[in-house]
Image: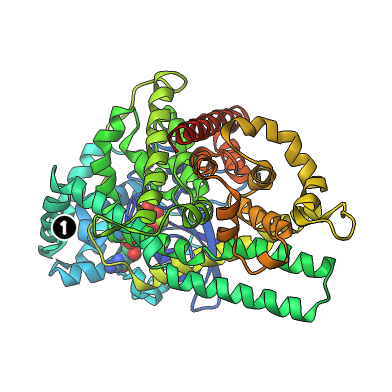
Amino acid sequence: MSTAVAALVGNPNAGKTSLFNALTGARQKVGNYPGVTVERKVGPLTLADGRTVDIIDLPGTYSLDPRSPDEAVTRDVVMGHQAGERVPEAIIAVVDATNLRNHLRFVLELKRLGRPMLVALNMFDLAERDGLKIDVEHLSARLGVPVVPTVAVRRRGLDALAAELAPLLGQAQVVAPLPPADIVDLQHEARDMAKAVTVAQGTARRTTQGIDRIVLHPVAGPIILAAILFLMFQSVFAWAEAPMTWIEDGIAVLQGWAAAGIPEGLLLSLINDGLLAGVGAVIVFLPQILILFAFIIALEQSGYMVRAAFLMDRLMSRVGLNGRAFIPLLSSFACAIPGIMAARTIDEPRDRLTTMLIAPLMTCSARLPVYAVIIAAFIPDQAVGGIFNLQGLVLFGLYAFGVLGALAAAFVLRKTLTKGTSQTFLMEMPKYQAPALRDFTIGLYQRAGAFLKRAGTLIMAITVVLWVLVAFPQSPEGTDGATQIDNSFAGRIGHAIEPIFRPIGFNDEIAIALIPGLAAREVAVAALGTVYAIQGDEAEVEQSLVERLRGAWPLPTALAFLAWYVFAPQCLATLAVAKRETNSWKWPIFMFVYLFAMAYIAAGLTFWISSALL
Ligand SMILES: Nc1nc2c(ncn2[C@@H]2O[C@H](COP(=O)(O)OP(=O)(O)OP(=O)(O)O)[C@@H](O)[C@H]2O)c(=O)[nH]1
Ligand SMILES: [Mg+2]
């Protein structure tokens, strides 16, 4: 007999994924805003009697009548429309105990399917904390299905849930499905039921409303948002300094050991100039990336994210973007790939396409190493106006530049290719919560893991290939590093494409770095690390990439390089996801071309203007 299947279904932000993680030991992403989960995920749960059941986590939806692609997934799985997919034997309806009247409506709709079902009355801790009392037995009697109070984040009620689930599996469906009911009728029924089972009202709403009066205030709101974002970018520089020095020193120590233990020659060059200089140049940025993520995760978990989306909606609608695009776009600060996937929560196809097309303009974390290295080399580390640091300001400026570019691109796209009406911003405001420590740590840990894994696999592999291209063919004994690079394979490729980039101030070394940078943006830094390590003569071995760049590039070139990377289209993985999500090559190709054009123009303008001024 095949394993039974049970599906977690419910309104967005009810805690389905938290429950899924708790039941199956998975580590799927949770967040305090609607629309975190956009794909179905499966994991096994072992019941007390030894049977296993496959639990499916689904995107949250308000009804079985889907509006957006992620919600359609839920409908298809629940209704068994998904090809090759088993129909779930049981439905675990997850509801937020503090929001019964809204969440019960969907439960009533699900119940009409006549399938075995139970209700997880989740967030029971919040109900208790706020003095909200629910008569669980009464609720169960009225619904005619088992109701189990749960606290997904503290793993409370899981055994009881599994115990109620067990008898539902393998149960023949006896209840005939009822035809879909009128939505307004269901709404009334849900409201009456919520009223009847609520013994005492809680205070949760009041706290949330109190905070919202401040953070959504027309004047104070945007100021608070700007301050938070600003603090985020300042911290990326200020707090990361010490740990970055440790990593740099650690790499220098390794290079010293290698130099002492391995005889001068190709092997030593591969290790020191290739692996350590290349991969090391990227790994150094781990602290900055973690700080950035700590902020993003905290914003997601606290419930502030949706408020930020609300505040940005006015600005975004002016360029024709849906306020819902804010969350996909903010996730793109981490990486455009989850950002583009998160666009599935946008129901209007043209809104969705616009959001996907501009997502790569949000500065992803892979660009952080590129920015950071150039900023460290060329922007003085000095205080501005007493509290700000010039380097942090420039970083903030680059992020802002990317956002402005995205808004401009959206504006043009909405007037041309993705013309059409836009929907108004409608999004449920989640209640505020302190981030759950476990989710926070797991989130950070996963980010660090993903970054290091990339550094240890993809980036390392490309670095080795690049080292080969730079170290071969070998120039005769005694030639200097610069000549070696000139004559190498990479040097020749660099020369060949350099004419394209010369007008915007790029040199051969940059041209060489741009190609491997296609695979992953941070590889450009690794590539520069390797190129300059080989080029450097004996006296410069100890120099970091930052010091070498400072000696090698004029300021306008450095600024042009920064401007290039604000728009740089170079990330094959993003293009591949855009292909998958739009189901055609047309849009990823368009994306590449328009981003390339923007990058070229921005870098060119920066180079010409700064050359004229300096
Ligand atoms: N206090 C408390 N918080 C919870 C509980 N369950 C989930 N949360 C929090 O509620 C938020 C939403 O949780 P998710 O598991 O992402 O919700 P979801 O239903 O999967 O949401 P979507 O995927 O967007 O539909 C997160 O911030 C969780 O930490 C709970 O039982 N108690
Ligand atoms: Mg989820």
Horizontal arrangement in the rendering, residue 371 relative to residue 180 (left or right): right
**Residue 2 image-quadrant placement:** bottom right
**Residue 196 image-quadrant placement:** bottom left
The amino acid beneath tag 1 is Thr
Q: Return the x and y of residue 207 as percentages of the image width and height.
A: 13, 61
Q: Return the x and y of residue 254 as percentages of the image width and height.
A: 67, 77
Name the secondary structure under disc 1.
Answer: helix
Q: Nearer the viewer, residue 56 or 352?
A: 352
Task: State whether residue 95 appears in this view.
Answer: yes
Q: Nearer the viewer, residue 191 or 249?
A: 249
Q: Name the residue tied to disc 1.
A: 208
Within 10 angstroms of label 1, few (less than 14), some, or many (20 or more) residues?
some
Horizontal arrangement in the rendering, residue 137 relative to residue 604 (left or right): left
Q: Residue at x 40, y 40 (%)?
A: 401
Quarter of the picture containing the C terminus is top left
Task: State whether residue 147 appears in this view.
Answer: no
Horizontal arrangement in the rendering, residue 557 relative to residue 347 (left or right): right
Q: Residue at x 21, y 43 (%)?
A: 187
Quadrant in which ligand 2 is drawn: bottom left
Horizontal arrangement in the rendering, residue 513 relative to residue 396 (left or right): right
Q: Residue at x 24, y 59 (%)?
A: 386
- In the rendered view, would you say 190 is above or below 49? above
Q: Return the x and y of residue 60 as percentages of the image width and height.
A: 38, 50
Q: How is the image coloured?
A: rainbow
